[in-house]
Image: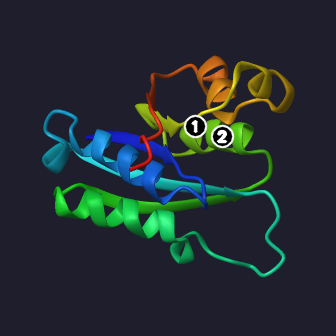
Amino acid sequence: MYDVLIGIDNEADRRAVAQAAAVADLPNAADETTAHLCHVFRDNPEGASVHQLSAVRRARETLEEAGVTCVHYEASGDPADELLAAADDVDANAICVSGRKRRPTGKAVFGSVTQDVVLGSDRPVLAVPAPIKE
């Protein structure tokens, strides 16, 4: 079995679908892959659940249509740190992330969860490009 942790942003339906499609395209994904759909809440005063997020639902639909097994995972805190901890927790074979399109100065000033995950992980990271707007 191959476990992939997919880090999903709550405002990124198209990116989540692109990530799901990339995981579904892995060899033998339908038979051998479990996708852990993970969202990290920075601030969650209403007590929302990962199940309620549109991006997570869209990713799950894409994966289930491809026959990939899905499970939900949620955490609270710093997204990069929590994604790395979640990958350890589920003993993921890989982490799948998708970055926003930003100018180089924006990345330097605001940081990047994707960059932090790539640099901080001891396992393979699949970085899926953000889809081009239609």
Q: Does residue 120 appear to the left or right of 29 in the view shown?
A: right
Q: Nearer the viewer, residue 27 or 19?
A: 19
Say whether residue 122 is left or right of residue 110.
Answer: left
Residue indicated by mark 2:
85
Element under label 2?
A: helix
Residue 38 vertical position relative to residue 3 in the rendered view, above or below: below
Asked if residue 5 lies left or right of residue 81, the reply is left
Residue visible at 70% across and 37% down in the picture: 80
| Figure check: 130 above or below 57 | above
Apparent side of residue 9 relative to residue 6 in the rendered image (left or right):
right
Q: Which residue corresponds to the image point at 62% horizontal and 75% vertical from the top-left? A: 49
Say the numbered circle drawn on residue 88: 1
Q: What residue type is labelled 2?
A: Ala
Instruction: List x then y, in percent, for residue 112.
Output: 71, 31
**Picture disc at residue 31:** none
Q: Position of residue 91 (x, y in %)?
A: 48, 38
Identify the element where label 1 is drawn. Answer: helix
**Residue shown at 40% from the left, 41% from the top:** 4
> Which of the image's four quarters has the N terminus?
top left
**In the rendered structure, which amino acid carries the disc numbered 1?**
Asp
Number of other residues with Cα within 10 Å of mark 2, as a class: few under 14, some 14 to 19, many 20 or more = some
Residue 31, position in %: x, y? 14, 48
Which colour style is shown? rainbow
How many other residues sit within 10 Å of disc 1, few (<14), some (14-19) or many (≥20)? some
Compare residues 123 and 132 and report the one nearer the observer.
Answer: 132
